[in-house]
Amino acid sequence: MSPSNEEAEARLKARKPIPKPKPAYLPVAGSPLAVDQDLYRAIAQAPRILLEEFVLPIRSGRAWRAPAGSIVRISTPEGPQVGDLNLWNAHNPREHFWAARTKQLHASHVSTYDRLWSNLPYMRPMATIIGDSLSWYGVDETGGRVHDLLGTGCDGYISSVLTAGEVTDEDENEYGGKEDGRNYYDFHCRSNLTRAVLPFGLNESDVHDVINIFQVTGLDEHGRYFMNPCPAQKGDYIEFLAEQDLLMALSTCPGGDLSLWGFGAASEKEMIKCCRPLQVQIFRIGDQHLLQRGGWRPAVPAPYRGMHGMFVPEGEYQATK
């Protein structure tokens, strides 16, 4: 039962002032949270050898492998465009990016020298941001910040809930399949990522919460999620150092730069006006000994064994002792 208005006001008046909180997770010397900025700056500035590059068309997805110690650069070759990024261990897809823990360890929006962490029981860095041409953005007048971990990718499920599949019959061929007599749009970020990972033996259940790169978001005065237009210009970029062998997948969001975003068939047609491609480049560091000299090693899982206070007997004798 909720308190009455009078009781709520009384509680508010009686509440003691709350001092400015300190972050719950702060790096200490030697912690994996404390990046050696001199080393990572040298990595970012080192000569590079291009291993692979491609451009993702609008409203599409693609996956690729990035070996440990490589640099992945994602850029906006034609102007502002939001991208939804997933990461997995290239050898074990059960280990994947963990947006919630990354948000706790660093911030709700990440930038240079922040790391993208993996899920339990692995709990190790997957990639470290070594370059961000939008690091100047800071906090805008609405409280928005760039490179979002607050939200996740768009998907057909929530869209169908919010719009009840409101697509006219004339749009059937242009906007995906028809189910239960209604049409649904099939090129949301989750759909793009699902198609992207199929050639690598993964499926929709492997797609997880994303990092929304180049996307500005925040919480309003009521704690509600909002999205602002992407501030990227032609040639803006974000760069990652792969801390382990990675499989990465990216979607060029069908919302484009989010200047025209909305839900429903009319919005899906309108948003295509602000959709642009994204470019991906994977580099090997030209100085092959730089990482070794700097003491860099591929990330290792957290040392906790995950016993959780349990003992598993090996057989009848051990179980009855």
Image (spheres, helix red, strand yellow):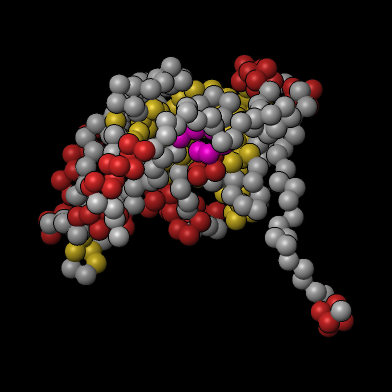
Q: Hey, which quadrant is residue 116 in on the image?
A: top right
186 vs 316, left or right, is: left
Q: Is residue 104 visible?
A: yes
Q: Compared with residue 128, is residue 174 higher up or lower down, i.e. above or below?
A: below
- Residue 102 is situated, as x and y percent measured from the top left of the image, at 54, 39
- Whether the magenta-drawn stretch holds residue 107 is answered as yes
Q: Hey, which quadrant is residue 114 in on the image?
A: top right
Q: Is residue 147 visible?
A: no
Looking at the image, which residue is at 61% across and 20% down?
44
- Residue 158 is situated, as x and y percent measured from the top left of the image, at 30, 55
Image quarter in which the N terminus is found: bottom left
- How many marks overall? 0
Chain part drawn in magenta:
103-108
Looking at the image, which residue is at 87% across and 79% down?
321
- Residue 129 is situated, as x and y percent measured from the top left of the image, at 56, 28
- Residue 212 is situated, as x and y percent measured from the top left of the image, at 42, 37
- Whether the magenta-drawn stretch holds residue 254 is answered as no
Looking at the image, which residue is at 39% across and 51% down?
190
Looking at the image, which residue is at 30% across and 42% down?
10
79 vs 131, left or right, is: left
221 vs 148, left or right, is: left
118 vs 213, left or right, is: right
